[in-house]
Image (cartoon, rainbow, N blue to C red):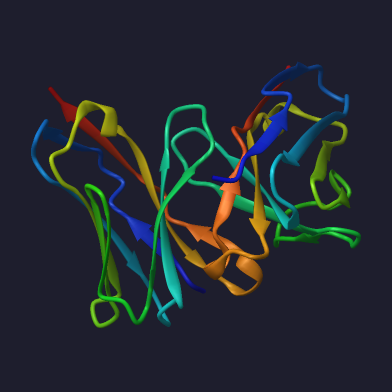
Amino acid sequence: SQKIEQNSEALNIQEGKTATLTCNYTNYSPAYLQWYRQDPGRGPVFLLLIRENEKEKRKERLKVTFDTTLKQSLFHITASQPADSATYLCAKGNQGGKLIFGQGTELSVKP
Amino acid sequence: GAVVSQHPSWVICKSGTSVKIECRSLDFQATTMFWYRQFPKQSLMLMATSNEGSKATYEQGVEKDKFLINHASLTLSTLTVTSAHPEDSSFYICSGLAGDRPYNEQFFGPGTRLTVL
C-alpha cells in the first residue's frame, strides 16, 4: 500500500534560518503532493501543491521540490519566523480526491 | 480562500449517547466531503468519503453503523457518532472538495474535539 513518511522528530531552528522538511513516499509516484500547515487544535491549511512533472514550486517564502527518482518531496521555509512554528503535513492525492497524510513534522522557530 | 465550518467546536458527552457533528462549506459547493479523525500527536486518518446525495464510502476498519454520515446538500455533511465510548474521544475534522479546483485542493474545517466520559 502507498505510504507517506515524514520525519517524526521535531525540527528546531533559529529565526532567520531556512527550515527544510522531508516527505518520502513508497511504491508508485503520486500524480501530485500537497503540503499543509496545522496549528494545535485546528484543521490543516493548504499551502502548496506540486505535480509529478514539476521539479519545484514557490510561494513567497515557501518552496517545494518533487524528486520522483528519490521518491521524495522537500519543503523549505526561508527566512523563518517564530510565527512559522506549527506542524507541517505532506499528503498524497488518490483518485476521487482522497488524501493520504504523513504523520507530520513539528517545526519550532526560536527567536 | 474557501471556508469550511464545523459545529460544535467541542463536545463532551456521556458514554452510550450519540453526538452529531456538522460540516458546512460556506462559500463554495462541495460535491465531495471527507471526514478524518486525529489522535494526539498523530496524523489525520481518513474515515469516510461523502458524496452529495449518495451513501458514504468508509475506509477499512471504520464501522459504518457507528459513524453515520449524511451528505444532504452540496454545503452540508453530518457525522453522527452513535453509542459513543471513551475510545471514540478524538479530534474530528471534515474537508470539502471544490469540484472546480484543479488537482483536488481540499479545504478543511477547524475540527471538533469530542470527549466521551
The spot of residue B97 in percent (x, y) is 65, 57
The spot of residue A104 in percent (x, y) is 38, 47
Which quadrant of the view contains residue B2? Answer: top right
In the rendered view, would you say A25 is above or below B82?
below
Q: What residue do we see at 84% from left, 37% from top?
A: B80
Q: Is residue A44 left or right of residue B83?
A: left
The spot of residue A55 in percent (x, y) is 25, 75
In the rendered view, would you say A22 is above or below B69?
below
Number of marks drawn: 0
The spot of residue B84 in percent (x, y) is 81, 30
Which quadrant of the view contains residue A65? Answer: bottom left
Q: What residue do we see at 70% from left, 62% from top?
A: B60
Could you tell me which quadrant the N terminus of chain B lies in? Answer: top right
Could you tell me which quadrant the C terminus of chain B lies in? Answer: top right
Q: Is residue A45 left or right of residue B8?
A: left
Q: Nearer the viewer, residue B13 or B7?
A: B7
Q: What residue do we see at 12% from left, 45% from top?
A: A18
Q: Is residue A104 left or right of residue B111?
A: left
Q: Nearer the viewer, residue B47 or A97?
A: A97
In the rendered view, would you say B78 is above or below B45?
above
Q: Is residue B31 left or right of residue B82?
A: left
Q: What residue do we see at 58% from left, 64% from top?
A: B101
